[in-house]
Image: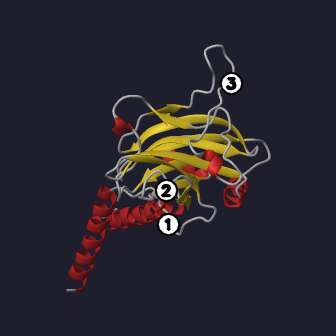
Amino acid sequence: MNVTAIFKSAAMAGILMLSSASALAAPTSFNFTRITSNGTEDVGSQLQMDVYNNTDAAAFLNQSLTNKILFTFANSAQIAANIAEVYFDDSGLLASQTSIFNSLSGFTSFSPVSWTKPNGTLKNVVLPGGNNAVPGFAPTPYFGANVDPGNPNLGVNTSSDLLGILVSLNSGYSFDDVTTALTSGALRIGLHVRSIGAAGNSDSFINNLAPTDTVTGVPLPASAWMFLSGVVGFLGWQRRRTLA
């Protein structure tokens, strides 16, 4: 095989790689509505939750998954804010919380919500101000994540931070059921956000029922784009050389 043929083959492989990358990891995205008013600055529009189906979650995490849904949480941080707690109010779709993924991008440090007292009985865990929601927000036991104690910057507080929570679905439910539940209110996600704005107040938020138009995906590495650009340039040069 000559050099031109090799580069043509590489170009085709690159195009297929681009097609594959664009076909995967296209989540349903939601912003958030504030349900408390402890401060004057409302950051709900800069908080984003992306919900990935099993196939796209597996591609994103690079692992084999079965009947899982991945929730990721980001903060574009135009106004200073720090996502510190995540809660689920579920009507029966979710079977279990499988994993918390810190530092999918940037850096976060979260652990599962502590649901049991030292004597083993269930705690009354609440989303601060959750009764302001209609109906009141009732966190589902054994789901959710709290920022670890220590540096306040362990939460989702910069545009590069990305927190992931992987959950298993109950038998008979699918990704479509999850998105339907999120848009109907049968499944709600609550966030407690701290250190908002100059005053440093905290507020609670619940996901909007309507998805946003924002679709984020797994970006193709810059090296891949550079490689493909080089291949295209070489093929153009080779064609001009042949015609000369």
The colour style of the image is: secondary structure
Q: In the rendered view of the protein, which quadrant contains the N terminus? A: bottom left
Disc number for residue 48: 2
Instruction: Give the residue at x 27% y 79%.
Output: 239
Disc number for residue 122: 3
Residue at the far bottom in the pictured view: 244
Which secondary structure, mark 2? strand
Q: Nearer the viewer, mark 2 or mark 1?
A: 2
Q: Nearer the viewer, mark 2 or mark 3?
A: 3
Q: Amino acid at mark 3?
A: Leu
* Residue 39 versus residue 84 in the image, above or below: below
Question: Label 1 near label 2: C-beta < 8 Å?
Answer: yes
The Cα–Cα distance between marks 2 and 1, rounded to whole angstroms, is: 9 Å
* Mark 2 Cα shell of 10 Å, populated few (<14), some (14-19), many (≥20): many
Classify residue 189 as left or right of residue 214: right
Which secondary structure, mark 1? loop
Within the image, what quadrant is residue 99 found in? top right
The x, y position of residue 160, in whole percent, is 35, 50
Q: Earlier in the sequence, mark 2 or mark 3?
A: 2
Classify residue 233 as left or right of residue 174: left
Instruction: Give the residue at x 64% y 62%.
Output: 209
